[in-house]
Image (tube, rainbow, N blue to C red):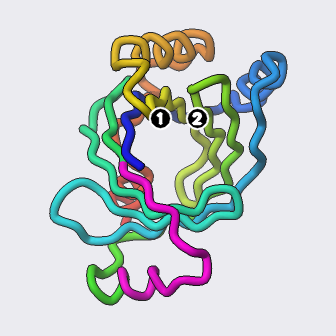
């Protein structure tokens, strides 16, 4: 399955406020997922195997490292939980880094919200406006992302350009 996102990631010290807002709007709460993202060495974009109870995918994506709303071109593959995919990828490509996080997952229509606590990095919020079939368009996705940026009072200096994997690699 291939789709585009317009997304932001930001440092968040006000997860309680965001959580309260999402609950007040009756956001669809998917749950809290402990996710292990194993990033692999690849020539283009990023490739990660996400292992969680709620979300379990092989994900390839390409995205610029810029602060604020940015487009991410995503391809998802849902592997069989019992497969040896991780062993194959590890042997063939080698592990770049591993991101260990607890993630609260919410949806309001096509907009996905993550309240993340990332081991070694801290707390973050992610907003992903998702167009899974090409019917929404980038302009509307940008509008949605910017709307929640303002609503959550996310400061420009709190926006993160990089992925969690990049931030962890920079620390090591």
Distance from the alpha carbon under mark 1 to that under mark 2:
6 Å
Which label belongs to residue 125? 2
Given residues 31 and 157, the one toward you in this image is 31
Residues at badges 1 and 2 in contact (C-beta under 8 Å)? Answer: yes
User: Which region is colored magenta?
Assistant: 75-89
Neighbour tally class for label 1: few under 14, some 14-19, many 20 plus, Cα within 10 Å: many
Horizontal side of 87 relative to 51 (left or right) equals left
In the image, what residue occupies the spot 40% across and 16% down?
Answer: 142
Q: Position of residue 27 (x, y in %)?
A: 76, 26
Residue 89 is labelled as none
Q: In the structure shown, which secondary structural element does the residue marked by tag 1 occupy?
A: strand
Mark 1, residue position: 9
Query: Looking at this view, is 120 or 94 the one in front?
Result: 94
Counting residues from the start of the chain, the first of labels 1 and 2 encountered is 1
Residue 56 position within the rendered picture, expressed as x and y whole percent measured from the top left: 58, 63
In the image, residue 108 above or below residue 160: above
| Residue at image point 36% right, 18% down | 137
39 vs 55: above or below: below
In the picture, residue 150 is in which quadrant?
top right
């Amino acid at each position: 399955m291939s789709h585009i996102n317009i997304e932001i990631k930001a440092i968040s010290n006000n997860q309680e406020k965001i959580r309260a807002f999402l609950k007040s709007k009756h956001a669809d709460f998917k749950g809290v997922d402990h996710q292990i993202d194993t990033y692999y060495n690849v020539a283009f974009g990023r490739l990660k195997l996400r292992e969680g109870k709620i979300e379990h995918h092989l994900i390839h994506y390409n995205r610029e490292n810029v602060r604020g709303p940015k487009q991410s071109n995503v391809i998802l593959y849902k592997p069989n939980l019992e497969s040896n995919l991780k062993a194959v990828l590890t042997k063939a490509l080698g592990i770049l880094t591993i991101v260990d996080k607890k993630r609260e997952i919410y949806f309001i229509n096509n907009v996905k919200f993550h309240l993340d606590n990332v081991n070694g990095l801290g707390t973050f919020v992610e907003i992903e406006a998702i167009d899974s079939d090409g019917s929404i368009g980038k302009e509307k996705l940008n509008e949605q992302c910017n709307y929640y940026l303002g609503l959550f009072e996310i400061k420009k200096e709190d926006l993160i350009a990089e992925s969690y994997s990049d931030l962890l690699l920079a620390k090591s």
